[in-house]
Amino acid sequence: MGERLLDHDNLCGASLLSLVASGSALIAELLRLAQKIPEPYLDPRETPVAKIMFDFAYLREPDKFEHAVNTNDVLLQTDVEFQKAHGAYALRFYGLIQGIVNYWKDVQVFLDRLARGYFISHNVDSVLEDIQGKQLLCEAFFLYGTLLLLLDDHIPGSARERLIITCYRLRGESTLEAEDEVCFLARSTGRVLGQRQPKHCPESFMSRFSTKTTQKTARLLIQRLMSDDIYLQSANFPSPEHRSIRLASQASMLYVILYFDAETLRSHDATMREVVDKHFSDNWIIPVYLGHFVDLSVEWVGYQAATAALGNILAPAAIKEVANANSELIARCILELGDILTEGQLTEQYLLDHLRGILDCTRRCNAALRWRLLHRRRAKHHGRTVDVNPGEPGDADSIVTLMLKVSQLEYKVKLILQRLLEEKMDRWQALKQQVVERMTELSKFFAQARTAAVRVTQDKKMAEWFSALAREAKSLDGASGYRTIVGRKIQTFVSALEEVEHFDHVDTNLHIKALLADIRTDLLQMVCISAITPDTIHVIEAVSDLSYAWGLLGDYVPIFHERVRAEPSTAVLLRATFLKLASILDVPLVRIAQCDSPDASSVASYYSCELVTFVRCVLDVIPVSVFGLLDEIVQIQTNDLLPLPARVESAYLLDYAQLCARYQLARLTHRVAVFTESVLVVEKTLLGVICIDPRQILHDGLRKELVLQLSLTLDKMLRFPAAQSWSAKRGRISDFVHVHHAHVHSILDELAMRVDGYRRSVEYVQDYIDVAGLKMWQKELTRVIRYSVERECNRYLRRRVSDKESRYQSNAVPIPLFKPTTVPPGSLDNDALTFLGRTLSALLQLTTPRHTSYAPACAGWYKNVAASTTLRRPICVEICGIRTFQILERALGVVGLVAFDRILAFQMVRELTRFYDEHRRHLAVYATTLGSLNTAALADDPAGCYMSAVRAVESLMPTVLHSIQAIGHAQLLRRSLTHALRQKSRLDADFLSHSTTAIDTAILGDILDFYRQPTSTPFLHNSILTRFSALGDAAGLSDNMNQIYVAGQPQESLSSLLLLFFLTYAHKLHYDERVASLVKRKATYPIDGYVIVAGIHSILKQCHVSYTYRLVTDLGQFVCVTAQQLKIGDRVTGDSLPLEIVNAMWFIRALCRAANMRVPAGSIPGHILGASTL
């Protein structure tokens, strides 16, 4: 035997095998990247990055394009953020194109080495004579052509050019390898998906790196594919009727490789007729690679010879004849499968007796299924209808029936054959031993003398013959290498035993005839068992291949779902279908596994994940059905069932029984249990490198549907009216606050009832679906809310977290995305992305300082309403308070309150940063005015000095007011959220609350000890602080009023600016004892006293404490100067003090109280301080 190409030490075979393996890995990488193309690269016209997305026109004048970006600050910032977000993907795509270029270069180098005799005993002809050699060489060309076809089909040319330019701008020309070749390959072909392809496409794409050697080799490969069965599929499909299936793999190769020699497609009529008659005589839709199909009548429309050759098979009469034959075959196959799969029919003995017939049946079934699956969908798009009416053989329902049944047959047959192979030698030996014993018994039987008990005449020759036969049988060897010889011997034994049975003294003895019949049966059983070899299983695996249907089965998922809904036990049959579909892994992995490529794990993981995703999609019908039933359970538990009291009088027992409602509840619960049981009875299945656990699939499906229902409910119900629309349609915007208060409360109440109904229903059925329902509920609600927090907080981040990077998003259990609500411009929630943003905007609208006043003693927001007939003063009505946050907690839980707190914290950071930036920007303009306040007390006219400074900065104050109130507003909302969390913690988890408080105190003590003695005290690990910080926030232990949000820098004249701010707006406020705070004097003033205190305190808290002392001192100086100028005596009373002094005194006390400090001694005269009792 000569040297084989794939022998261990054959360099030529190893090089070629490595090339083919790398091509398969590149295809997996291409498909992986094609699924994750950033949206701006596909269609940047309607995106903010449209002006920084360049195609290859950039390469002609790069300086011009760069100048346009660099001279525009907005574009420059957008460009930086875009490159950070998508630069890694662009570099990975560049690596893919470079890999394709290098792959084809390596193929060319290999061909050159073959031509130059580098491999000594190998040349192109010898490689093509070797079975593995011609397979690998054809695959090398086929994979390169497939790479280009998939590249042009999955990643449009315009997107390719933009990705390459992104890499060019990100890394620079000097750091990119093979830049010219990569650009040449990635250049757009002009093809647009869904439109007629350009002329000479894809042949021009494949010829971009063509050489004479590759063209010559392509012609040799075409001839070899036309003449040989390179994959030796004759044993798998021996029937002439299945020729197109037998040659299907090389037909796909032939289609691709013909583009390397497009002249054959154009003008070689005889060659194309031979190609079509042999490979495409009854099919014109061919699968090129997994999920990629081509219609020859469309792809070859520009090639005269190819179009002419297809004319015969595409004639309407020919198509109708093939379609009708296929429909009849499907009907016949379904009947045959029904007979074979009858309960108790398919046994080991039946399989051994009818193995050939069963194999022929599976061949016919798979042939019929293949033709119908490939031609049914594609033919609709091009006017060649091969579909049939519903209910007739060949319709979608019959295709699914055929697929399920043939999958089940193949699965059962393989199980039986595998068991027989494992027990083959043991059974063979047992049967042989039984045959020998019975022959020995017959020998002894004929050797005995005739007696009353033994009514057979003694026959020594017969005894010796049976004895010799027993020795021959004992010498039989069941090894596979002697299968033919042994089979002939056994047939000789059977023939001899049949002849012996006709002897007179044997024919009259029923006992001997029974022994002979048993021996013949055992011998024939030995023949059948010896015929079972691993090749038999290989034939079934080859026949049952379903890889061609990848991408087509999605059309039949609704039918799978309908079958499972109607009969949940159908889910058991799906396991065999999934195992049949697992054959897609053989296509890309066979060569990678042969050469032990390091890419094996990543490629297998990718295709396995794709397969598991399809399995999840099919089995999603069960959790969807379960949650459809849960909706009815929620309605019954929420609306129909009355709450059962602890004691019920016998007279009212029937009323509380509610037998009809409880019957409906029990019926729905039973259906839920049936659905889940149908999945749980399915065994674990290994698909590729991933083991599918049906229990895990069920749990993930339930979680997915729970997340979907939760997200839909939250997004649908948490929608609030905008103030602008109210003002335009119904009246004054001030009236909107009252209506908005009732509307928000009603929405939150309704949501709380709905969410509680879902929670109770999941908890109710958890024992019937074998899941920890309450745990799943809490986990998924937390994930949905935290994902929404992440999306809302992206608005405040420079480096945004994309969905692919989110730790809360999942492929198995995705959180759905909803489009942001369209609202009028200027609305508070015009940038809200999720239900959390809309709800927070509603709270901000509800508590806006423009229309409400905050009462620190009551921790709520109040608004004046018109006075009644009995009261002269307006009534102060609570708009938002403790009850509001309790309803919010019932609707969204503790995690919802924490979510709002986190979003507000991000808003605080943004507003504080904006305030400090604005302050530094205006400091240069107003530095003189702000500095003059340091010597205002020494001026001749101190009050005039203050007033002139106020007038100088008057234009700046509206902006400062907006920032301070935004900061204070957010702080007060955070404090109310913290109070609600603390109350919830103490009421529902008292022990946890106290434990958390104790740990918090201990941690703070340890931190203080470390800073006092850093050398002797160990510092706590950051992970402990991070985890406990999250727990402390949920328990309401955080003190947001004293929190540091931004890194403080020296802010020159900050206290002077805040002093002028207070003086600007002090006359618009007065003290209201009902809310114990400063409130606006007129309803039109957009200001609230305590909100200003909270905002100024938060601004000063980011700086050194001396800034707070400085502001209090400056305010005290203003009070002293004003009192001195107004000649206020020692006996002054609070009622006689001017409004500015009263407001200043209240502000000083409130600010010091918020900062946990005393009023500095000597800053305010004692008689004035004593006169003010606010």
Image: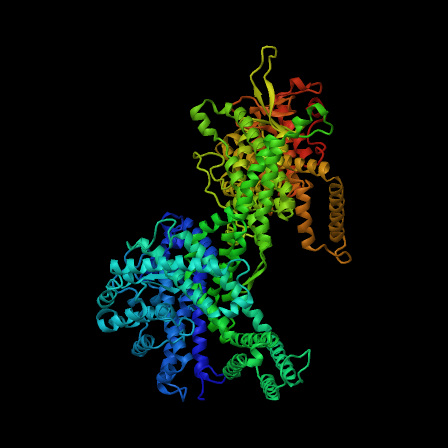
The spot of residue 998 in percent (x, y) is 76, 44
| Residue 1080 horizontal/vertical position (percent) | 57, 24
- Residue 200, x across and y down, in percent: 26, 65
Which quadrant holds the C terminus?
top right
Pick out the residue farthest to the right. Answer: 1016
Pick the residue in front: 505 or 195: 505
How is the structure coloured here?
rainbow
Quadrant assignment, res 150:
bottom left
Res. 268 in view: no
Number of numbered labels in the structure image:
0
Task: Note whether 741 is above or below 70 in the view shown.
Answer: above
In the picture, measured across the screen, residue 919 lies left or right of residue 1114, that is left
Q: Is residue 646 above or below residue 232?
A: above
Front position in the image: 240 or 206: 240
Foreground: 409 or 726? 409
What residue is shown at x 28% (from left), y 54% (from top)? Answer: 383
Q: Which quadrant of the view contains residue 442? A: bottom right
Q: Is residue 1004 above or below residue 852?
A: below
Residue 745 placement (x, y as % from top left): 57, 29
Q: Residue at x 42, y 68 (%)?
A: 176
